Amino acid sequence: MERTSTSRSHDPALHPERISLARMRRGLTKIELAAAVGVSARTVTTFEAEGAPPERAAGLSAATGFPASYFSRGAAPDVPADRMLFRAGRGTTSRQRHAAIAAGASGIEVDRLISARYALPAVDVPDGTGEDPVLMARMLRQMWGLGTRPLPNLVQLCESRGVRVYGLPELAESVDAYSIWHEEVPYVFLARRKTPERSRFDVAHELGHLILHAGLGCASRQVEREADRFAGELLMPESGVFEHLPANPSVERLLAVREAFKVSATALAYRAHQVGRMSDWAYRHTSVRLDGAGYRTGEPDGMRHHERSKVFPQVFAPSRRGRLGAGEIAATLSLPEADVHALTFDSAMRLVVGEGAGPSGSPRAGAEGTRPSRAGSASGGRAHPASERTSRRAGRRHLRVV
């Protein structure tokens, strides 16, 4: 995930990259968009390379569902497909991957708007390029003062260290997750189609990519294994596994510890076997029992809700002075309001139906020697008093994300 910058700066009447992003976001091929607009596929190719005349805005809007004004905005954030390390399902199509990329570009624009209005926690993510994944996970726990205890809400923990966590829309959900550095800011884009425990592992996996693979140009099995090793140690540290699990634990004991660490039962069993707390025979026997009880495809009696953001409920809170509404964000950025809701995990819609801004809640409810950190924050993401005064003078309000 190479840190990227904005794309080319020329400003045609209808911007070529925005035409491409809108098409990708809706899962359309160039041929399909051409048929919807009433032009040839070659013309669409020209639109996406050189821009389009203003009179085509209405047709592009009707075909993609994006406001006509979206296409005349300036250059969009560049989220290059060849730099993405997708944590995708086997059946994921190119349409779904492209939709995820386009959603990421919109998410970065939403984040810029929120960051202009609010002072978000400083980025405090170490650079672990080339380091051992397990050692980096242990170092991160030490740097963030986490010890060996089970981790709290992982979305909020990432947010408190400057990592932006955004949702993926339904079309892109099979991607599961991906991450990217953009202009020195780390982003995780996360789907919610899995169980809460497995989504939590996805967040840890993407955090591993941000730390270990920032300058990587392509994916590989080795890279994915490294991110998995990082996530395993971060969520279930070896010392914590030995502390909480006896040798060859019973399934009942395994399930009890699973609740404490908020991981899937199969992941905990694998981890216990990996670190030598479970013999080969015990692991096979446990796996058979878990498979028979439905734990291979689900998580019976697991976490009731996906972990919630702490940023978005504060941004959308009706009682917060200077709050942003999903409609205002959509209008300012010329985005479909439904896309804003998807990117922010439907936080605004939950508040409208009175579910509050607490850390839990259904993801669809209401509608739906250490190396230095990249941004050098030693305060755990909390604003320094001097910077707080400066931000207030500039009209930005601090969000409490701890």
Image (cartoon, rainbow, N blue to C red):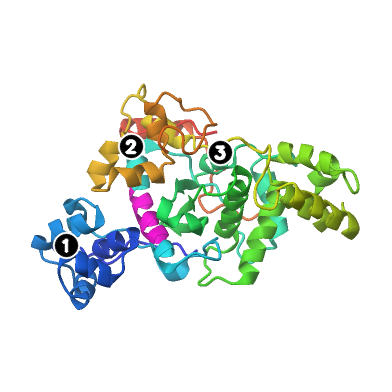
Q: Is residue 82 left or right of residue 41?
A: right
Residue 374 is situated, as x and y percent measured from the top left of the image, at 53, 54
Mark 3 or 2, closer to the camera: 3
Amino acid type of the residue that numbered disc 3 sits on in the rendered structure: Glu
Task: Residue 117: give its label.
Answer: 2
Q: Secondary structure at mark 2?
A: helix
Amino acid type of the residue that numbered disc 1 sits on in the rendered structure: Leu
Q: Secondary structure at mark 1?
A: loop
Q: Residues within 10 Å of mark 2 (few under 14, many from 20)?
A: some
| Magenta stretch secondary structure, dominant | helix
Mark 2 and mark 1 lie on one chain; the one further toward the N terminus is: 1
Task: Residue 59: give its label.
Answer: none
Of residues 196 and 392, the one drawn nearer to the viewer in this rendering: 196
Residue 236 is situated, as x and y percent measured from the top left of the image, at 73, 47
Mark 3 and mark 1 lie on one chain; the one further toward the N terminus is: 1
The residue at which mark 3 appears reads as 307
As drawn, 73 above or below 318: below
Q: Residues within 10 Å of mark 1 (few under 14, many from 20)?
A: many
Magenta highlight on residue 293? no
Of residues 17 and 6, the one drawn nearer to the viewer in this rendering: 17
